[in-house]
Image (tube, helix red, strand yellow):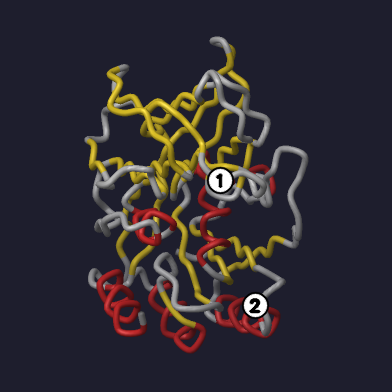
């Protein structure tokens, strides 16, 4: 592996020094590093255009936090390129290595001492009276929730067209195993090994005496339908993209995506090590 495309979160402190070091280590070892200098979203909500990535690229390196990795996974999923995350923020679940370990990590990538881990993604679609309004691919989750000025919302929760429950709640999280350690975890949902294949449904503060997450197989279709007498304002968030123009009766359809995210890993216990650190500091 010699050809790399680097996406850096320039809003992080010291990112430029880390970026310079990463480029230097790659080029001095005979590799090639192309840097993305985009700092904002385009008209389609993307931070990185697939067309900007050179065709010979073998790996995408991200410098930042989990948010940078999520953006890269979503924006570039059509390319099928593996991602290697270097963490410059807090202890993140998605990044493979830390700022202090860059030299060893780059050596491992250049010498082929890694393996590829595949992660499932979700496709979220919004329909109004049968007409598709919006479609997005998510690595972490698809979340139906109230806007900043509303609290409780009402919605129906279906699995394969079977009504499971009508909720009065703050919302619902539909998460991948990768997203299990994100918003799902904060809402009391289960932690799942990221290479698993399942869909997690976790209600947000439902108005019931019992609140439980539901673990579903990957071949199901989940539907969240906005209450037809809804008076609150509803928002759908798909990773870092939000759609806030929902009307009563609108449907959010979520299923496993045909696209996948690939991550380069240096050690098979890296996720467990990060989990252990998180539990020790929580």
Q: Residue at x 33, y 75 (%)?
A: 274
Whichever of labels 1 and 2 marks the residue nearer the N terminus, that label is 2
Which quarter of the image is occupied by the N terminus? bottom left
Which quarter of the image is occupied by the C terminus? bottom left
Q: Considering only vertical position in the picture, is 94 above or below 213?
A: below
Q: Considering only vertical position in the picture, is 203 above or below 84?
A: above
- For label 2, the SS is helix
Residue highlighted by disc 1: 151
Q: Residue at x 31, y 28 (%)?
A: 165
- Image position, residue 22 (x, y; %): 58, 79
Label 1 neighbourhood size at 10 Å, few (<14), some (14-19), many (20+)? Answer: some
**Which numbered mark, 1 or 2, is in the foreground of this view?**
1
Q: Residue at x 26, y 56 (%)?
A: 190
Question: Between 133 and 153, which is closer to the camera in this rendering?
Answer: 153
- Image position, residue 167 (x, y; %): 39, 34
Q: Considering only vertical position in the picture, is 256 above or below 133?
A: below
Give the CA separation, mark 1 to mark 2.
Answer: 42 Å
In this image, 213 relative to 8: left or right?
Answer: left
- Image position, residue 262 (x, y; %): 40, 52
Q: Considering only vertical position in the picture, is 179 above or below 101?
A: above
**Residue 19 image label:** 2
């Amino acid at each position: 592996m010699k050809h790399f495309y680097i996406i850096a979160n320039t809003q992080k402190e010291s990112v430029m020094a880390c970026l310079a070091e990463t480029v230097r280590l790659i080029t001095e070892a005979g590799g090639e590093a192309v840097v993305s200098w985009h700092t904002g979203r385009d008209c389609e909500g993307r931070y990185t255009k697939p067309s900007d990535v050179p065709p010979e690229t073998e790996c995408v390196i991200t410098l930042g936090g989990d948010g940078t990795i999520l953006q890269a996974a979503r924006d570039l999923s059509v390319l099928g390129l593996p991602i290697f995350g270097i963490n410059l923020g807090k202890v993140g679940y998605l990044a493979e290595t830390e700022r202090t370990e860059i030299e060893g990590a780059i050596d491992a990538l250049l010498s082929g001492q890694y393996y590829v881990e595949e992660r499932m993604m979700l496709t979220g679609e919004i329909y109004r009276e049968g007409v598709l309004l919006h479609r997005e691919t998510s690595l972490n989750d698809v979340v139906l929730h109230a806007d900043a000025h509303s609290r409780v919302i009402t919605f129906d929760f279906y699995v394969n067209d079977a009504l499971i429950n009508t909720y009065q709640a703050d919302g619902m999280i539909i998460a991948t195993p990768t997203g299990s350690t994100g918003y799902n975890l904060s809402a009391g949902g289960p932690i799942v090994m990221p290479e698993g294949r399942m869909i997690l449904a976790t209600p947000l503060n439902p108005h019931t005496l019992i609140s439980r997450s539901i673990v579903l197989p990957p071949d199901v279709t989940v539907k969240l339908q906005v209450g037809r007498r809804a008076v609150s304002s509803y928002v759908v968030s798909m990773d870092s993209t939000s759609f806030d123009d929902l009307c009563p009766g609108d449907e959010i359809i979520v299923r496993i995506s045909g696209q996948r995210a690939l991550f380069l890993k240096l050690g098979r216990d890296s996720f467990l090590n990060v989990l252990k650190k998180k539990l020790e500091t929580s």
